[in-house]
Amino acid sequence: MKSINFKYGLLIGIMSFIFTSCDQEKTAYVNNTELIQAYEKMKSAKAEFEQRNEKLSQELDSIALDFQSQIQSYQQNADKMRIEEREKEEDRLIALRQKIEKEQQQKSQKLERESQDAADVLVKEVRKKVEKYGEENGYTYIFGSNDSANILYAKRGKDITLEVIEYINE
């Protein structure tokens, strides 16, 4: 009788272990910031936009220097001008300064929008690659962690950031 109960108990124990093993969900997390910063396409895009920003800066500096030389020329010649000529030149310089400021702002905003749009596209691309990685490796969940500490604790070995970085850069 004890032998039957023992076998029955052992069988139930094995069955419950098998069922709970099958139901276990495979989870891990990645550091979002590291993942995005290490993505080669993101590095390339960042370098491209830094280069474009530098070019824009040089262009705007050139315009500012030209404007500054016009102001200096006006200041040197103001004493020789009639009042109407001075007022006309001052109005022109004020209008030119406003035009330059508006143009600078528009160009800077345009570059910033383009940079943000490119980053958004690449973040979506990374998400799709992480999703594919998760599917290929049997994960139920891959959580994202960042400096906001949305994962306060994770068991050692659950951080798969480096593995995923290698995967997305293939």
Image (cartoon, grey):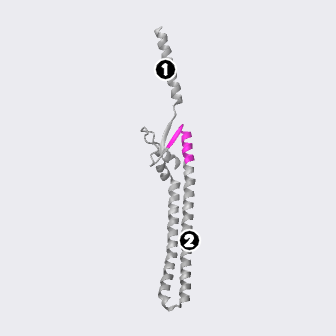
The foreground one among 54 and 170 is 54
* Percent position of residue 103, x then y: 56, 71
Res 170 visible:
no
The tag on residue 27 is none
**Which residue carries the number 2 mark?**
102
Residue pictured at 54% horizontal, 68% vertical = 105
Name the quadrant containing residue 111.
Answer: bottom right
Q: Amino acid at mark 2?
A: Lys
Mark closer to the chain start, 1 or 2: 1
Label 1: which secondary element: helix
Number of residues whose C-alpha sits closer than 10 Å to that of mark 1, classed few (under 14), some (14–19) or many (20 or more): few
Q: Is residue 159 above or below residue 94?
A: above
Q: Position of residue 161 (x, y in %)?
A: 47, 45
Q: Are marks 1 and 2 in contact (CB under 8 Å)?
A: no
State which region is magenta: 127-143
Decide which of 73, 144 is in the foreground and name it.
Answer: 73
Residue drawn at point x = 55 percent, y = 74 percent? 98
Q: Is residue 146 above or below residue 28?
A: below
Badge 2: how crowded within 10 Å, few (<14), some, or many (20+)? few
Residue denoted by label 1:
13
Image coordinates for residue 116, horizontal then vertical, percent: 55, 58
**Residue 163 lies in the magenta stretch:** no
Instruction: Looking at the picture, tell me which residue is in the foreground, 46 or 120.
Output: 120
- Amino acid type, callout 1: Gly
* Horizontal and vertical percent position of residue 55: 51, 69
| Residue drawn at 49 percent across, 14 percent down | 7
